[in-house]
Image: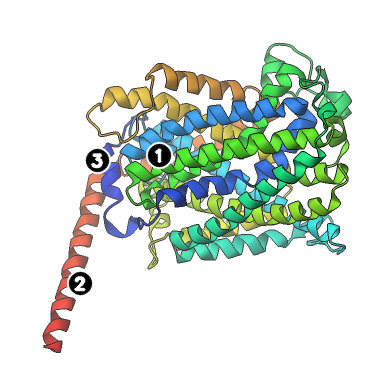
């Protein structure tokens, strides 16, 4: 079996320009930067940060954000180098298909599906939770949940998922414009949080900055002291389950990595970028700087307004919780509204990202080819609708909060393999033009990969077990279907590209004849 067969860069690029499986290039650097910021300034800044402080690192959650931001920033620069060479849909999946081989590309694609499906479902569910919180703060005691015996259906996620699915079917540019408007509003709310929050900061809340380690069962309850909930690293080294301390900072960084997942989604949209060799690296760079600065400022304010111990006592602590505990209920109402607005754009970007990954895998034959056909608006409309339905079913019908760590491990595994692929591609294809190059090859990419692995082993044992089960399911699909249907494996990739080119030429010829005929009639 040829598990490590690779697709050439030329084949990957040819697929993006021909036939009825190509996407429209209409996104600029600012569109891409806003796309990344839209995901990051959502669940992460409004919720995950408070949880990191409450349950992991205390005031040192500021350091957790810095660690996660630096590691993520370095990793997405690897994405930027690949995107400047291979501006094609699929992100890490496509990059590794041209370097390491098909089996590794499948693993990454399967990981990206895990990341974006569960992230989108979790965020859609959180959107409903925060919508109910906002209604409660405004004095409306209503619920979006409908109970059928023991089964609970939440109709709220259907609203946001349906709205953005329709926008993305109509065109990525339209979705990007709506996304941009909402994201600018969110940035304004973040500035409001920082400015107002500083008036409630008490320096005593920063002491101790790194709280001493405590047994996990003491802070999180008796059910949190078991093997399954402790970080894998603690279990491997025989340590007792603890929170806070140095290990708490690291596990906090692994948790808040969820906040930065938007930037690999930017790479999935590189096939829809105008001048991608310039705009993708620029968009990723601008977005990362904006997000790291905002997160650091919000973390400083959140941990300064209220003691991390008080946050730990609250149910599902968020940024709004901090303002409520500080006595600024009026500000909590504004922030709750901001959370509702903020999470909507996160859903849109993840809907886009998951669709583009499946689109790329389908175009290569690893998933059914019918999924990669585009409609009259230049988008894979049928696939986009199917992804929207899948998001809606999962988020409305299942308790998905336990899957947040699955998002992190899927992202980190993809980041690791992309970083390793940089020195491989440098050696394999030194002739390719690279508009952006990550410095320090090969040592910097190797260090980036090790840093991502370090965060991975600080996720819980249960998360690792679920991840291995997910990979096992993926391998069953690959060996049962994908390996036999791969265009590359059947020697039909070049044939498919050539056929698409012929179709494109025929379409141009027909269009030319129609135009000539029209002009003749007018004359």
User: Mark 3 packing: few (<14 Cα in 10 Å), some, or many (20+)?
Assistant: few
Horizontal and vertical percent for residue 353?
50, 48
Residue at 76% from the left image edge and 31% from the top image edge: 53
Distance between mark 1 and mark 2 Cα atoms:
36 Å
Q: Secondary structure at mark 2?
A: helix
Image quadrant in which you'd find residue 432: top left
Q: Which residue is mark 1?
A: 281
* N-terminal label among 2 and 3: 3
Left/right placement of residue 363 relative to residue 286 reads left
The label on residue 511 is: 2
Structure colour scheme: rainbow
Q: Looking at the image, is mark 3 or mark 1 nearer the viewer?
A: 1
* Cα separation between marks 2 and 3: 28 Å
Q: Closer to the camera, 228 or 293?
A: 293
Q: Say above or below: 352 vs 2.
A: below
Answer with mark 1 or mark 2, whichever residue precedes in sequence: 1
| Towards the viewer: 130 or 352 | 130
């Amino acid at each position: 079996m040829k598990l490590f067969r690779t697709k050439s860069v030329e084949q990957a690029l040819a697929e993006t320009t021909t036939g009825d499986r190509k996407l429209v290039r209409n996104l600029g650097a600012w569109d891409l930067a806003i796309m990344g910021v839209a995901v990051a300034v959502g669940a992460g800044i409004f919720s995950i940060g408070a949880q990191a402080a409450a349950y992991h690192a205390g005031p040192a959650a500021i350091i957790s954000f810095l660690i996660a931001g630096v590691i993520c920033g370095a990793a997405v620069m690897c994405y930027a180098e690949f995107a400047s060479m291979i501006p094609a849909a699929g992100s890490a999946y496509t990059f590794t298909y041209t370097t390491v081989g098909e089996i590794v590309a499948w693993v990454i694609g399967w990981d990206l599906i895990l990341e974006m499906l569960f992230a989108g479902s979790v965020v859609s569910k959180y959107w409903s939770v925060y919508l109910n919180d906002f209604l409660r703060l405004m004095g409306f005691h209503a619920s979006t949940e409908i109970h059928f015996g023991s089964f609970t259906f939440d109709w709220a996620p259907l609203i946001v998922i349906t709205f953005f699915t329709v926008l993305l079917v109509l065109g990525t540019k339209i979705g990007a414009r709506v996304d941009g408007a909402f994201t600018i509003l969110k940035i304004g709310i973040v500035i409001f949080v920082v400015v107002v929050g500083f008036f409630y900061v008490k320096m005593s809340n920063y002491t101790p900055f790194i709280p001493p380690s405590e047994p996990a069962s003491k802070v999180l309850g008796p059910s949190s002291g078991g093997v399954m909930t402790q970080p894998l690293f603690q279990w491997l080294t025989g340590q007792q389950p603890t929170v806070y301390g140095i290990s708490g900072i690291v596990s906090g960084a692994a948790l808040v990595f969820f906040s930065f997942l938007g930037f690999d989604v930017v790479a999935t949209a590189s096939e829809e970028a105008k001048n991608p060799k310039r705009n993708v690296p620029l968009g990723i760079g601008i977005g990362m700087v904006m997000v790291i600065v905002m997160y650091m400022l919000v973390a400083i304010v959140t941990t300064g307004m209220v003691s991390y111990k008080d946050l730990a006592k609250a149910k599902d602590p968020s940024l709004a919780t901090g303002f409520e505990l500080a006595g600024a209920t009026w500000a909590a109402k504004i922030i709750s509204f901001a959370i509702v607005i903020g999470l909507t754009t996160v859903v849109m970007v993840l809907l886009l990202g998951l669709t583009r990954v499946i689109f790329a895998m389908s175009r290569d034959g690893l998933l059914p080819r019918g999924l990669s056909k585009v409609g009259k608006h230049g988008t894979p409309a049928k696939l986009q609708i199917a992804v929207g339905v899948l998001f809606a079913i999962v988020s409305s019908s299942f308790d998905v909060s336990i899957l947040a760590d699955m998002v992190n491990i899927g992202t980190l595994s993809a980041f690791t393999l992309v970083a390793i692929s940089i020195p491989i591609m440098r050696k394999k294809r030194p002739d390719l033009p690279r508009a952006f190059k990550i410095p320090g090859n090969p040592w910097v990419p190797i260090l980036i990969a090790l840093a991502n692995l370090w965060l991975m082993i600080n996720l819980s044992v249960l998360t690792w077990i679920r991840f291995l089960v997910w990979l096992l399911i993926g391998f069953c699909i690959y060996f049962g279907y994908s390996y036999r249907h791969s265009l590359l494996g059947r020697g039909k990739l070049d044939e498919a590209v050539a056929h698409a080119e012929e179709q494109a030429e025929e379409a141009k010829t027909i269009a030319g004849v129609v135009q000539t005929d029209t002009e003749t009639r007018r004359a």
